[in-house]
Image (cartoon, rainbow, N blue to C red):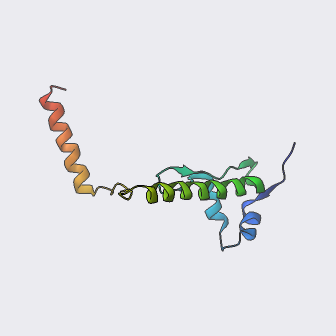
Amino acid sequence: MIEEYRTLAQVARDIPVKTSPQSLWRWCREGLQVKSGDRIHLKHIRCGRRILVADKDVNDFFDELKAADAAYFRLRSSSRNPIQLPVPRTDRQRTEAAETAHRKLQDLGM
């Protein structure tokens, strides 16, 4: 069965909120990060130099985003303590952690 595929520009025009073809391409390549930290990707195919997407895959992508959000908020509201997402370390913190790890390895003779 051959599905009907459309270009990213054609799909972008039909999404109800203003969306650029470049955004769709990013969703294909990098995915969209959800609250859990996972990335959800828009499925696509390449036909020569063109990137094509099936309408079903676009709908599935948005359904996956919706399900990930629902799961996150359901988990968050069911626990007494809200989920604490890790705070990214600063460059200084990262450097200090690397130096500490290096010293520990040297102490162990590694």
Lateral position of residue 110 relative to residue 85, left or right: left
Q: Nearer the viewer, residue 73 or 101?
A: 73
Q: In x, y percent, where is residue 67?
A: 60, 55
Residue 10: image location, x then y, percent: 77, 65
Residue most extreme to the top: 109
- Residue located 33% across and 57% down the image: 87
In the image, is 30 to the left or to the right of 89? right
Choose top left, top right, bottom left or bottom right for residue 18: bottom right
* Above or below for 105 versus 17: above
Q: Is residue 54 visible?
A: no
Please tell me which residue is depicted at 70% across the width and 50% down the height of the picture.
Answer: 44
Specify the quadrant that holds the C terminus: top left
Q: Nearer the viewer, residue 78 or 40?
A: 78
Number of labelled discs?
Answer: 0
Q: In the image, 81: left or right of 71?
A: left
On screen, residue 3 above or below 65:
above
Which quadrant holds the N terminus? top right
Can the viewer see residue 65 in this picture?
yes
Left or right, 69 with respect to 102, comes to right
Residue 71 x/y as whole percent = 53, 54
In the displayed orientation, state which residue is furthest to the right: 1
Q: Quadrant of residue 92?
A: bottom left
**Residue 36: x %, y % from top left:** 47, 52
Residue visible at 71% across and 68% down in the picture:
15
Q: Nearer the viewer, residue 51 or 77?
A: 77
